[in-house]
Image: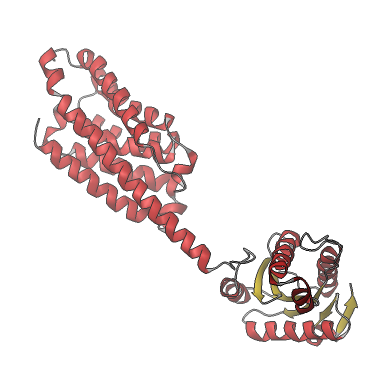
Amino acid sequence: MNPIAFTDACVLIALSYAALKLKHRLFMERYELWSAPLLTGLACIIIMLQPHFGDPFAAVLYCIPIIMAGLRFGWMIALLSTLPPAIFLLMSEPFEESSFLRILQELLAPALVSSWFHKKESASAYAEIPFMDGLKICGILGLTRFLFGGYLYTNTHIVDYFSQLLPLLLFALVIIVLIAMYNDDNRTWVLQHRLEIQANQDRLTGLPNLRSFMNIAQNTARRRPLSIMMIDIDNFKRFNDTYGHLQGDLLLCEVGQLLSSIIHEHDYAARYGGEEFIVLSHITDNAQLSAYAHKLCHAVSAHQSHSQEGIGVTISIGVSVSFNPQADLLRIISEADEALYASKHDGKNRFTLHPSIMGITTKNA
């Protein structure tokens, strides 16, 4: 076997490593439909540029990028990935029937066979590629190479077939190495993703925490008007003292999940701290905000708590609005907190619009 095959294997592994580092970049994910086939096709062409390109059996490695594309992304990207090397092959050789048969065997067949083993989760880094799938692909393609080799290259002798067992074993080894690299990168990505979620999530309720909320609210406040709702569970300290902190934690989880299921699709709810929650809404109209706050109060008061059956739970809400972009977010939150205090002072189980909106408005829910 030509030692260049080992060099090709190292080149493929290096190219794949570089591609993995680019995989999670924004432009790669946004333009994946063309970026993935382009990079895959270029990797194939780089291997084709090696001196052994004319050898019918030694060039088994240049279809490996297409196999990985099929396993990771599916049939569409795998087939698109065959276009650059196919064009290069046709430009490098005379237009003969054997050229098109080579494209079929060495490019299209790997794309279709590998796509057969594709799982949707693999493209989003939520599932690993099974090593056995890689070995099955190697077996199928190796068998087809032996079956069609005699037809494509009539001067090939039986000795030549056995002499190519080592290149085919190298072919399988590279596939396994690349799958291992991809799976290891996926595990790292999933771990980082979980750590990011934990850093931005309240452990008790599962809602976003205040840190996550402030990042999103500040970005939103720079672009458009918004409203802030401060929400507090009424008589929570008494509930804790009567039924214990465990039941209090269960109540916090129930109310938090209930609020997150009721708010509008584009709104954002988070745990502010203690028994308080905070909601960012894109609604700024007073009438709509009043109806919205009333809906939240009514939903909680009508909810049958699983923590203590027969115990009524209510909330109080304070609402403030930022009508202009670039408004001070902390000031808006402070105003919502003042309105919440007014709701508490006026009897609880109600909402209050801050005076800065249009004169203080307090309504019993």
Point 78% across, 82% down: residue: 340
Across and down, in percent, residue 89 comes to 24, 31
Point 34% across, 39% down: residue: 68
Across and down, in percent, residue 256 comes to 70, 65
Point 83% across, 71% down: residue: 314
Across and down, in percent, residue 45 comes to 24, 39
Image quadrant of residue 253?
A: bottom right
If the image is split into quadrants, where does the C terminus sit? bottom right
Specify the color scheme: secondary structure
Residue 320 appears anywhere in the view = yes
Residue 26 appears anywhere in the view = no
Task: Indicate whether 208 appears above or below 327.
Answer: above
Image quadrant of residue 318?
A: bottom right
Q: Is residue 263 left or right of residue 2?
A: right
If the image is split into quadrants, where does the N terminus sit? top left
Q: Is residue 233 left or right of residue 329?
A: right
Across and down, in percent, residue 267 comes to 69, 65
Tally of numbered discs: 0
Between residue 341 and residue 48, name the one nearer to us: 341
Point 67% across, 86% down: residue: 331
Task: Indicate whether 312 appears above or below 162.
Answer: below
Q: Which residue ends up furthest to the right in the rendered image?
A: 364
Task: Indicate whether 25 appears above or below 337.
Answer: above
Task: Indicate whether 273 appears above or below 255.
Answer: below
Q: Is residue 171 left or right of residue 274?
A: left
Image quadrant of residue 87?
A: top left
